[in-house]
Every structure is written in structure tokens, then in C-alpha cells.
Image (cartoon, grey):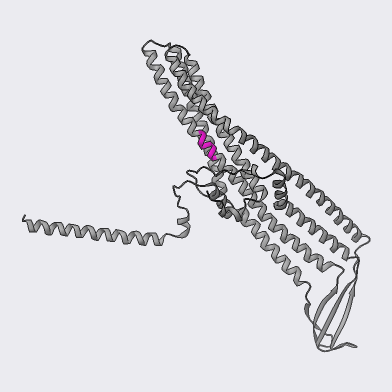
Amino acid sequence: MTKNSFKMLKTQKLGIHLHLFKSLSIFLVLFVSMVPPSLADDIVFEEPLTLIDAMTLAVKYHPLVASREGDYQAALGDLSAARWSAFPTPSYSARGLFDSGSQDSFSLSQPLWTGGRLSGNIELAESRRDNAVANIVEVEQILLEDSARAFIEFHRANSKLTISVDNVTEHKRLFDIIDRRVKAAISPEVDAMLAKARLAFARSQVLQNTSAKEVARSELEQLIGRAVNNVSAPVRFSPSLVPLSDIENAAIAFSPRLRAIQSEIAGLNANARIASSALYPQVSLGYERRFGELLFAQEREQVFVALEFQPGAGLASRSSISASKARVRAAMKTLAASRRELRRKVQIAWREYESARLQLSPSRQLVSATTEVVSSYLRQYTVGRKSWLDVLNAQREVVQAQHTLADYEAIELTASYQIRLLSGALNKNTLSDSNE
């Protein structure tokens, strides 16, 4: 083969490769453009999930929020219908007469005074609308609390699993050390048996923490509706910078549960007004126009004022009024009890946060100290000043200190986020402002 022929063959191969590359690129572009949005949404990225992202997903896609929003739309429809009831009511009727004639009539009726019935119906519909709004915010708050708690629990389980895996690695190293000494007849065989038992226990802890992590992962995935592979460390807040009394007042002012009860009380007061309206006559202005044959003494067109009074059977109306007022008093007691319960929740979260925060520094110092003790005991063991059991116990204390630190960190995080959620400092509208 000549030199020119070799160059031509090489150029042809390069052209074929470029053609295949262009064809493959066009195919990939067409394939990506044909992927439906729903499929694209299901793609799981490997970036760690942040706590704010998890909370955002929970309130954005959970079906409970959509259910409460549907109730709100229904309440808006009821309110619109109640407001339209204050407008004139048209009616049309047709009848056949004995003499083979017919008569049609058209009428309008405009309420003038109903004793509070119309305004009561409107207030009742408004209270149901306000209750629906409060229920939406309440569900969002519950989902935010649950998703934050599940996220932090998953982060704690992941931390404990890492601690357990490192513990297994350390026990393997200790077992190899004592195994060599036993084989060299320097240490008794019982030390190797003890190290092997501690290694088996460390492996069982890995299994337990793996199970706990999967349970936490499942709970978090059910709340946010997405697969979770890894999470990032949550951002820490300092609620202690704000006085407890201010947090309690903010929680009472924000609480959607209290707002829902207040709207229920408004609805019960409206029901009492509706019940009281039965004790008064209903006055309305009417207009009627007849078409076709007229009967004796009938007018073709007339305007009239109608008076209607239906007090009900016996003293039923007064009994209904008494029942409505009793329900209002009961709801007021429920509101007072709910305020106390909310203050209790805020105070408990505050105490848990303060207690965990104060334990963090000693726990970190304990982890650092026990880690140094293991190395010190291992050196002293080689010169006969410490037993092998002392070395293994020191390693166990390291793991216990690390687990305790992980627990306190999780308690502090959970309590701090609960305080912010209860006080309204963190809600659906402020999630975008919380950068992690």
C-alpha cells in the first residue's frame, strides 16, 4: 500500500467516524426532546437533598394540601351562593285553566328584612371560608414539622450508621493486633475471643442502624413523594436569641389551629343569628306579571309587600337559640384550652432545645477525650499497664459518646425547627428565604 493510499483510507475512516458521531448526537437530541415532563420529573439526581428542599416538596406535592385547597374552593362557592341570596329571586309558572285557557306568570321577590337570616348565612359562609384557609395553613404546618423531623431523623440514622461502620473498622484493627499477639503466644487466647465478640457486636450495630436508616428514609420519601439517596447537614438556628415570651406570643398570633377555632366560633355565632331570625317576620318586596287568561279579580301586573312568619313548632326556635349559644360557649373553652396547649408545646420545645444545646459542647469534648483514651490505653497495654479489656471498653465508650453527640444534635435541630414553625418564622412563604 502506497503512502497516498494510506492517507486516503485514514481520511475515509475519519469521515465515517464523524458521520456516526453526528448521527448519534442528533438521535440523543431527538430522544431528550421527546421525553415527557412527567418522566423528566421522576429522574433522581445524585445531589444531596437539603432540609428546606424536603420541606418545600412536602407542602407542594402532598395530597392533603390539595384536599384542603379543594375544601377552600368549595367554601368560596358557598360564600358566593350566600351573597347572591340577597338579590331578587325570579320565578316563572304556567298553569292550565278549566275553560281550556292558560295562564303564565313571572314574579320577582326581593328580601327587605329577614331578622338577620341573610346576613347570618353570609357570615356563616365567610366563617367556613376562613376555616378552610386556616385548615390549609394547619396542614402545611403539620407537613413541615413532620418532614423536618423525618429529615433530621434520617440524618441522625445516617450519622449513627457511619459511626457504626467506623467502629467495625476499628474493631477489625484491634482484633488483628490481638490476634497476632495470641499467635505469637504473647497474649492469652481469651483476649482474642473477647475482641472477636466485640467485633460481632459492632457488626450487629451496623445492621440495626442500617434498618433504622431505611425506616427513616421510607418515612421521609412518603412525605416528600421523591426518592432519597443522600441528605446534606441541616442549617442550625438559634431560637434562644429571642425571649420565650415573645415566641409564645408569636405562636399564638400565627397558630392556624387557633384561627380555625376562631372561625368556628364565628360560624356558631352566625348560626345563633339564623336561629334567632325565626322569631321575627320576614318582609319582602314582590312584583308579579301575568300572561294569558286572567281569573276573576286578578290583576295583570302588581307590586306588593309580603310578610311571612314561621316561628316553628312550639318553642323549637328558642331551643335552637339556646343550643347555638351553648355551642359558642363550648367553643370558647376549646379556644382557651388550645392556647394553653400551644404554650405548652412551645415551652417543651424551648426546654428541649436549651437542654440539648448545653449538652453539645460537653459531648464533643467527651468524644475527643475518649478517642485519645483509646490510643493511650493501647500504648499502655503494650507495656503491660492496661489490660486488653480496658482497651475494648475505651473503644466502646468512644462509640457511646459519638452516639450521644448525634442524639443531642438531632434533638437540638428538631426543637429549633419546631420553635420556628410554631412561631411562624418558618412557613411555606418563607421557605425560599431560608438558604441552606
Magenta segment, prevailing SS (helix, strand or loop): helix
Q: Residue 127, how many percent across, how many down?
A: 75, 60
Label count reads: 0
> Quick one: 37 or 428, which is closer to the camera?
428
Which quarter of the rendered picture does the N terminus lie within? Answer: bottom left
Q: Residue 283, how many percent across, how many down?
A: 88, 74
- Determine if residue 174 is in view: yes
Locate residue 160 relative to residue 320 in the image: left or right. left
Give the residue at the far left of this rendering.
2
- Determine if residue 62 is in view: no
- Seen in the picture, residue 106 relative to 423 is either above or below; the reply is below
Locate residue 13 relative to residue 268 in the image: left or right. left
Would you identify the image quadrant in which residue 94 lies? bottom right
Magenta stretch, residue numbers: 154-160
For the point 78% across and 50% down, the residue is 335
For the point 46% across and 31% down, the residue is 165
